[in-house]
């Protein structure tokens, strides 16, 4: 029996390479988690938790595994269950010993365990995004920064931190957790040791801001105490300044329901407030049907959530549903959707491999009396969603991506591209480039079929159509290529 002690994905991978090189089967390895990461108050240096694994004297051959496994392993490694290392090695061993398609066997016990752990990690990341609250602190030089303390269920700081750097790029902030801390200096993320709750900053002026915010978005018409406890677990309440308001809000809820009917709901909320506890497509779709996080829900007929299988390899993201989609409640069924279907077919991409959705789930339009009327008898002119509406709706898109985990993503049109790549994205310069984003290693932006249909110049229209087909074909061919050596030889460093 061999003993392997690891506490991070990198350490597990190094140890797995070494054991594979020695041809050690899973039954002959006892995996355990190394001691917890040091806190600020341990004597050991902070780098200890990320130390390079011990050197190996014998180089090993390269091992090639499906990229999907490495992605899965990276996230499962953040789970707290000590069995994760054993199950990961077992699946890795089987992938390399004749069961190449093992990950597709969703009823396999090992695959099921990994999938369950990944779901729990994903859900924890969502909770962290929703429940972290920053408090302002001022240092001796008068420099302001924002600090939050959070206690996640799993070791997810590195999975969640990029979200906060994107959401609060112009702030100096730190998030402290018992496992690990992260600091953002407006340029990059720095990771450090964990911090106990006793070191977290106390109440300050920012707390009042959060309370006001929470009171303004608290929707008494939707009040369900059990659901609230599930969505905002009681153990998080201690770090939420708004928790002190809950009792008062509960008391006042009936009165506020009446008031809310009288006025438009506040807009300072996002779809995160409607996020269900379960991150599966059926639960997400049902919850999104009730979303009123931005004004777009008012004039629209219904929420148009994404469609496709949970195992789709390719996710296609458009801007928003159009007139026909709004009426039918299905994305990409109008003329643009039909053109997309035709081009997908030409690119050899089966519909069941595709999940289609939009960055905004309600149709934004202005009604006119002009002819060319829609099914409602008025002409509804598409309006581009603004940045606040995209921001409000973003949690739905992120939840779809987290649930499906596509191997590739395509943004159709500038709105979708800028939502995923950032506002500096330029379609004329970057169309067709495959770039990594925090959601997917293979993300590309290309023409929206609606833009092709609107193009008045026939020659240019044909050219754009060919470019869209070529872009999709290229991206798809990348997925069919054999993966590169994802487990290169254990080095002899
Ligand atoms: S557009 Fe998105 S955020 Fe706005 S109400 Fe619809 S689903 Fe909610």
Image (tube, rainbow, N blue to C red):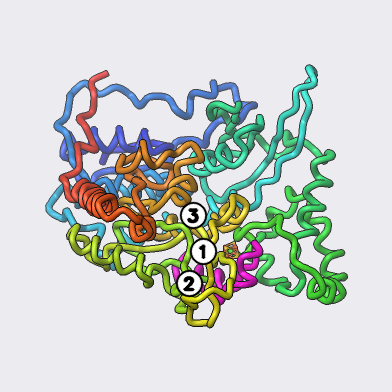
Which residue is identified by label 2? 323
Quadrant of the image where one finds ligand 1: bottom right
Which residue is identified by label 1? 382
Q: Out of 351 and 2, give the one closest to the viewer.
A: 351
Badge 3: residue crowd in 10 Å (few <14, some 14–19, many ≥20): few
Which one is in front in this view, the residue at disc 3 or the one at disc 2? 2
**Residue 424 position in % (x across, y down):** 48, 36
> In this orientation, does residue 91 appear?
no
Q: Which numbered circle lies on residue 398?
A: 3
> In this orientation, does residue 159 appear?
yes
Q: Out of 241 and 115, give the one closest to the viewer.
A: 241
Q: Residue furthest left?
A: 98
**Would you place residue 155 above or below residue 404 in this image?**
above
Tag 1 and tag 3, C-beta contact below 8 Å = no
Q: Please say whether residue 108 is one of the residues in the magenta stretch.
A: no
Q: Please say whether residue 293 is one of the residues in the magenta stretch.
A: yes
Q: Earlier in the sequence, mark 3 or mark 2?
A: 2
Tag 1 and tag 2, C-beta contact below 8 Å = yes
> Which region shows up in magenta?
277-302
Q: Out of 174 and 395, give the one closest to the viewer.
A: 395
Q: Which SS class for mark 2?
A: helix
């Amino acid at each position: 029996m061999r003993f392997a002690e690891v506490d991070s994905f990198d350490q597990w991978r190094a140890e797995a390479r070494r054991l594979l090189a020695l041809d050690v089967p899973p039954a002959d390895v006892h995996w355990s988690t190394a001691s917890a990461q040091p806190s600020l108050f341990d004597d050991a240096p902070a780098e200890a938790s990320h130390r390079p694994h011990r050197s190996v004297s014998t180089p090993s051959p390269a091992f090639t595994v499906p990229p999907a496994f490495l992605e899965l392993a990276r996230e499962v490694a953040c789970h707290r269950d000590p069995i994760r290392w054993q199950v990961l090695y077992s699946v890795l061993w089987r992938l390399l010993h004749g069961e190449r398609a093992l990950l597709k066997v969703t009823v396999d016990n090992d695959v099921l365990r990994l999938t369950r752990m990944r779901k729990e990690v994903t859900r924890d990341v969502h909770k962290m995004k929703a429940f972290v609250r920053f408090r302002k602190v001022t240092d001796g030089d008068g420099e302001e920064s924002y600090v939050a303390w959070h206690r996640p269920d799993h070791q997810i700081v590195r999975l969640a931190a990029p979200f906060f750097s994107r959401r609060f790029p112009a702030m100096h902030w730190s998030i402290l957790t018992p496992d690990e801390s992260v600091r953002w200096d407006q340029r990059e993320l720095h990771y450090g040791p964990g911090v106990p709750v006793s070191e977290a900053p106390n109440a300050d002026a920012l707390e009042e801001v959060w309370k006001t915010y929470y009171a303004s978005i608290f929707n008494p018409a939707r009040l369900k105490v059990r659901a609230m406890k599930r969505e905002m677990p009681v153990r998080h309440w201690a770090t939420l300044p708004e928790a002190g308001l809950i009792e008062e809000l509960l008391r006042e809820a009936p009165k506020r329901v009446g008031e809310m009917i009288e006025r438009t709901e506040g807009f300072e909320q996002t779809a995160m407030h409607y996020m269900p506890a379960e991150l599966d497509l059926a639960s997400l779709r049902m919850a999104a049907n009730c979303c009123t996080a931005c004004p777009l829900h008012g004039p629209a007929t219904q929420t148009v959530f994404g469609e496709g299988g949970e195992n789709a390899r390719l996710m296609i993201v458009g801007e928003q549903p159009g007139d026909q989609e709004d009426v039918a409640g299905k994305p990409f069924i109008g003329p643009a959707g039909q053109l997309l279907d035709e081009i997908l077919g030409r690119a050899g991409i089966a519909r069941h491999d595709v999940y289609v959705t939009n960055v905004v789930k309600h149709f934004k339009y202005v009604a006119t009396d002009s002819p060319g009327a829609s099914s409602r008898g008025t002409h509804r002119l598409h309006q581009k969603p603004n940045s606040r509406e995209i921001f409000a709706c973003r949690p739905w898109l992120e939840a779809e991506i987290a649930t499906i985990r596509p191997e590739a993503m395509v943004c159709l049109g500038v709105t979708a591209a800028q939502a995923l790549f950032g506002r500096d994205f330029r379609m004329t310069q970057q169309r067709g480039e495959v770039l990594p984003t925090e959601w997917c290693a293979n993300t590309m932006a290309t023409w929206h079929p609606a833009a092709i249909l609107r193009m008045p110049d026939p020659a240019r229209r044909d050219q754009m159509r060919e470019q869209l087909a070529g872009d999709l074909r290229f991206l798809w061919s990348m997925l069919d290529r054999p993966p590169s050596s994802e487990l290169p030889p254990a080095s002899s460093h």
